[in-house]
Image (spheres, coloured by chain):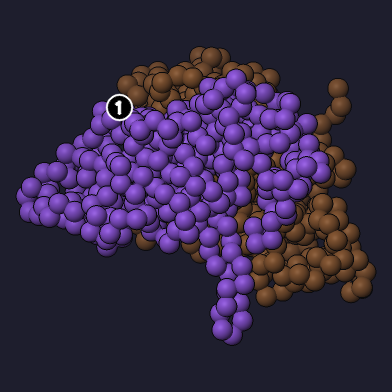
Amino acid sequence: MNPENKTNNSLLKVDDLKTYFPIKKGLLRRTVGHVKAVDGVSFAIKPASSFGLVGESGCGKTTVAKSILRLIPVTSGKVIFDNTDILACDASYLRNIRSGITLIFQDPFGSLNPRMTVANIVGEPLKVHKKITGPGLFDEVRQVLAKVGLSSDTINRYPHEFSGGQRQRIGIARALILKPKLVICDEPVSALDVSIQSQILNLLKDLQQEFSLTYLFIAHDLAVVEFTCDIVAVMYMGKIVEQATVDELYHNPLHPYTIALMAAIPKITTTQRDLANRLKGEVPDILNPSGGCPFNPRCPFADDRCRAENPALRPVPGNSEHLLSCLHIIKK
Amino acid sequence: MIEEVTLLNIKGLSVDFFTENGIAHAVQDVSFSVKKGQTFALVGESGCGKSVTALSVMRLIPDPPGKIAAGEINFENRNLLSISEQRMRSVRGNRIAMIFQEPMTSLNPVYTVGEQIVETIRLHQKKSEPEAWEIAAEMLRKVGISEPGQRVTEYPHQMSGGMRQRVMIAMAISCKPQLLIADEPTTALDVTIQAQILDLLDSLQQQSKMSILLITHNLGIVAERAQDVAVMYASRIAELSNSKSLFENPLHPYTQGLLKSLPQLGFTGERLYTIPGIVPEPLHFPSGCKFHPRCYLGCNDKRCQTIEPQLREVALGRQVACWYAPGYERPDDPKL
C-alpha cells in the first residue's frame, strides 16, 4: 500500500494497525460493539527522521503510540521495529524493545513522580533496563542532564522545584538516558508557554542531530509539526487521511480536512480570516460512525459516493510520496 | 471617524496575594480602556496576571488571600471597586458576564443546562419560569445549537466540549451584557471548533454591540480578533497598542521575542528564535525592568537593572514600558 513500506530501510514500520476498544453493556457486560480508535493505520519511519501524526483530540494519534509500545491490547496488525514484530514477540523481548523506544509526555506536571528526586526519575530506566546502580548511575544522569540543558546541581531536587519548561527537560532526559533509537513525543510542547515552546523544540532538534534520533512526533499544532517533522500524516477518526512530506503537505494540501485544519489556525501574519474553508459541525460520534468516508458529514464536497464508499489511502497521481484517502480529489 | 465610547476603564489596578512566603504582587499598576463594541485582548504567558485582572473586574478575587490594593475599575459611570457587594451582584452576570476556559468544570454537572441558564435569567430579570425557559431555548438557538428545545433538558456530560462552551456563551449572553469577559475561551478546544466559537463570538458582538475583554495566550487569535491589545509580563503591561501596529512593529523586546519565537505555518528555518531564561515568579521578581535578565537590549544596562520603566505613550494609540523604545525617553529621566 505505502510505497515506502517496500523498502527495508525503515526503523519502524506499522502495518494495518487496528486497535478497537470493546463497548460493554448490561448486567453480563456483553460486548455490544467496538470503538475503532485506530482503524487500519500504516506508515514507516526512516532512521534519523521525524514522522508527524497530527489530528484533533480523539482521532487516535495517542492510541497509535500506545499500540506501538504494546501498552494496550492491539486488535490486529504489525509493528515492525528493528526487523521484529513488537506485537508478536514474547515478554522478555518486549522489555528489551522498550529500552529502544522511549516516550516524552505532554504534561510535565503529571508525568514526573513528585516524591522522587531528579536523579531517581531520570536514572530509573537505567536501573530497570541496564541494572546500573550507584555512582555510575549518577554519572550517567549528570551527563544526560547536561545534554538537555540542566545543571548537575539539580540532581537532588524534586519536580515541584522546577518550572514547566525545566520539567519537560527532565522528561526528555529520562527518555534519552537509555540511548533509544526511537523517541515518541506525545504533544511535547502543548502544555508549555510560548516563550518556552521554542526552547524545547530547538532542543529536540539539536538532540536529534547529536544522537541521530528518530522521532514519532504527535501533535495537534500544525505549525509545530511543520517545524519538527520530515513526513506528516493527518489522522481523522482512527484513519490516516493524508500523508506527505512536510513541504508537499503544507504547500499542496489536498484532503478537505487538511485544508480546513490549516485554515482554522489563527495566524499572526494576517488579519484576513479564511472563512471559506470553515468546517461545520463537530467530530461525529465514534461509536456510531456514518457509512462511507469518515469525513463525509463535515465535508463540503461530499456526494453520494462519499457516503457509500470508504476511500483507501492511495498515492496521488504523479507523486508516490503523497498519500490521500479522498474519492473527491483522486477521481479527477 | 466614528466616536469611540469607553465602556470599561481600569486605572492603576494593583492586586496582591498574601502567601506564606510573602506578598505576591500579581497585578501592578495596570491601566487600560475597553471601547464600546470592540474587542480588547490581554495577552501573556501563564502567571503574568491576565486572569487576575479579569477576576478583579468581576470582583471575584478570593479575599483572603488576595486583595485589590489600589486602582479604579470604572464601568458605566461608577467605580466597581467602591460599590456595595449587593450592587455588584446586580452587575455580575448581568451587565458584565464571563466565560471560562474549561466548560466542563464551570457548568454544574447535576443540573440540566436549561436549569442553569434559567437561574441566571431569573436572578437578573423579572421573568416567569416558563418565559425564562423560552429565553433559555432561544439563547441556545442563538449560539448555534440545533434542537434547542430538546437540548435545554440535557446535562453537561451529554454534550461535547465545543457544545458546552456554546452553552457557557448562551448563559453569559442571556442577560444581554455590555461587557463579556472571555478567559481563554477556546484553549481547551480543537482548532476547528475554536474557529467556530470565535466566529460565534464575533457575530454575537456584531448583533448586540457588546464589548469583549479577551484573555488569551494565543497571539494568532489576538491578531485575528482584537482591535486593541495589552501584552502583560510579570504583573505589568509591557506594551499596549492597537493590534495592527503591534504585529507590524512590536516595540517592547518581550513582544518582539514572543512574535519571533512562534512556530508559524510556512516557517522554513532550521531553528526557532528563543527568549533565554524563564518567566520570573511573583515572589522573586528581578529589580528594575522585570524583563531585563532575558532582554537582548537591557541585560547589561545599569538603568534597566535598577529602574523600572513605566508605561508611556510613544505614539498615537501606542504605549510601551521600555527604556530603549523609540520616543520613550524624556529629558528629565534619570540617567545611569
Q: Which chain is purple?
A: A
Q: Residue at x 51, y 18 (%)?
A: B325
Q: Residue at x 26, y 28 (%)?
A: A210
Q: Nearer the viewer, residue B86 or A30?
A: A30
Q: Which hue is chain B drawn in?
A: brown
Q: Quadrant of the C terminus of chain A?
A: top right
Q: Nearer the viewer, residue A175 or B302?
A: A175
Give amino acid for label 1: Gln
Q: Is residue A40 in view from this perspective?
A: yes
Count the labels in the image. 1
Q: Nearer the viewer, residue B123 or B283?
A: B123
**In x, y percent, where is residue B243?**
66, 27
Compared to residue A130, the image places residue A5 above or below, namely above
Q: Nearer the viewer, residue B111 or A31?
A: A31
Q: Which image quadrant for residue B58? A: bottom right
Name the outermost residue toward the bottom: A27
Q: Is residue B264 in view from this perspective?
A: no
The residue pinned by badge 1 equals A209
**In x, y percent, where is residue A296?**
74, 45
**In x, y percent, where is residue B299?**
35, 24
**Label 1 lies in what chain?**
A
Q: Which image quadrant for residue A140? A: top left
**In x, y percent, where is residue A69?**
36, 52
Q: Residue at x 74, y 37 (%)?
A: A278
Compared to residue A231, the image places residue B315 above or below, namely above
Q: Residue at x 19, y 57 (%)?
A: A128
SS at mark 1?
A: helix
Compared to residue A241, the image places residue B333 above or below, namely above
Q: Mark 1 Cα within 10 Å, few/some/many (few <14, many 20+)?
A: few
